[in-house]
Image: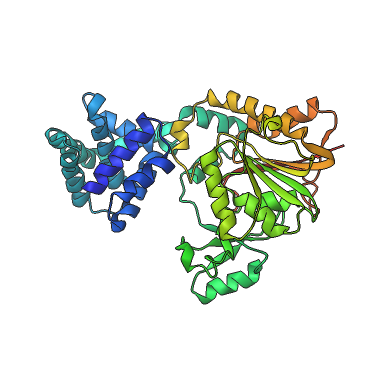
Amino acid sequence: MKTRASAAKVLYQVVDKGQSLTSALPVAQKLLPERDRALLQEICYGVLRWLPRLEFISRQLMEKPLTGKQRPMHFLILIGLYQLKYMRTPAHAAVAETVNAAKVLKSQSLSGLVNAILRNYQRQQDDLETKADGNDSCKFGHPGWIIKRIKAAYPDQWQDVLTANNARPPMWIRVNQQHSNQADYQALLAADEINSDIMRDGDLHSAETALRLEKPTDVFKLAGFAEGHSSVQDGAAQFAAQFLDAQAGELVLDACAAPGGKTVHILERQPDLKHLVAVDFDATRLVRVQENLDRMKLKAELIHGDASKPATWWQGDKFDRILLDAPCSATGVIRRHPDIKWLRRDSDIAALVQLQAEILDAMWQQLKPGGTMLYATCSILPAENIEQVNSFIERTADAKLVPLSADSDACHWQILPNTLDMDGFFYAKLQKA
């Protein structure tokens, strides 16, 4: 009962109040026994993945919507529907526990309504699900504006992309090359009965440090994790340090660096840099960067600053290489953060594109002649990616695209969420004349 009531409160905070799931969920989890925390996460993630479908079905079963102080009860109904449709919880238990959770929410007077809606859904399930399938937003669990943009960008793949966004993401780890390599670390994991795959793609690129685990595992069961022998990072994100390819003796900037996975990877890959500077607009997230550096026993200069206004925080030499992991819509990581679908608006994209352009222009001025910039986002929208880069090239006389790596002629790469089970990501490599 408490778990379902907690889930209703979290969903209310996210959907109605605009709070991120990564901030709302941990607070609720701390108030529950450890054994119930995974269930809370499963329910919250699941309802957010399939919110349009659950909303549509609930509307078919209710005479009028629940508003005001009754809104948490609305989300409790969605939780009940989610359990009946998507979870293995026995139907009688799902209904009973959801109905009883109304008491925890101090809405016992509505428990009869919750019971009636869930029972009616069971009786009409086939008909209701067929109706829901007639609407793309319900069928694919995305708001209409995202579907429209992805359809336009990927007319032959849009359904696969949306389906991938609703899948449970795998656990990827990054092998610290200062301690081991892919094959040796994979063998260490196998000795502990932890199976993994090495990601290879002959058509594009191979991540030199990435292993995809067969199933998610407690990080402290990974060989040498506490000592910094590996980190958790999606396979797509691991290409950042690889494509940046920082060399010994260089001055390197990691712009928009938090939470620091790429910062650490740059140093793991090239420990003999002259200096690494990591800047981020969010001071609280810089704490995460420092924690990541500390675990790996690495050092970088952390700066709280606005990447679009470097003059306010940097008066040193220009950089040999800059990694610009630009603020974006995060439409490539929806499978890990389903709340993105409901926290973003179509109107946000134009503002993000403008901010990205400002940061690109500002960071370019901090790059040495002959220097390299790697532009990256975790977006799959062309406006933030290839269109952004092309616009930058057109207005910047001393900028040109160069191949991402020595083994490929490709100067940019749009990774989609259905590519090799990785997150959606974009990379483009630019060189200053």
Residue in front for this viewpoint, 400 or 318: 318
Residue in front for this viewpoint, 317 or 224: 317
Q: Quadrant of residue 128?
A: top left
Is residue 144 toward the left or the right of residue 204 in the image? left
**Residue 229 makes an appearance in the image:** yes
Q: Residue at 61% across / 61% down in the picture?
A: 297
Q: Residue at 48% across / 62% down in the picture?
A: 219
Is residue 381 toward the left or the right of residue 35 in the image? right
Tell me: residue 283, above or below residue 359.
below
Tell me: residue 427, above or below residue 177.
above
Is residue 41 toward the left or the right of residue 298 in the image? left
**Percent coordinates x, y for residue 104 in the rendering:** 18, 42
**Which residue lies most toward the bottom here?**
191
Residue in front for this viewpoint, 367 or 188: 367
Tell me: residue 133, above or below residue 45.
above
**Residue 86 makes an appearance in the image:** no
**Percent coordinates x, y for residue 331 in the rendering:** 54, 37
**Which residue lies most toward the front here?**
315
**Percent coordinates x, y for residue 374 in the rendering:** 73, 42
Colour convention = rainbow
* Mark count: 0
**Percent coordinates x, y for residue 426 in the rendering:** 65, 41
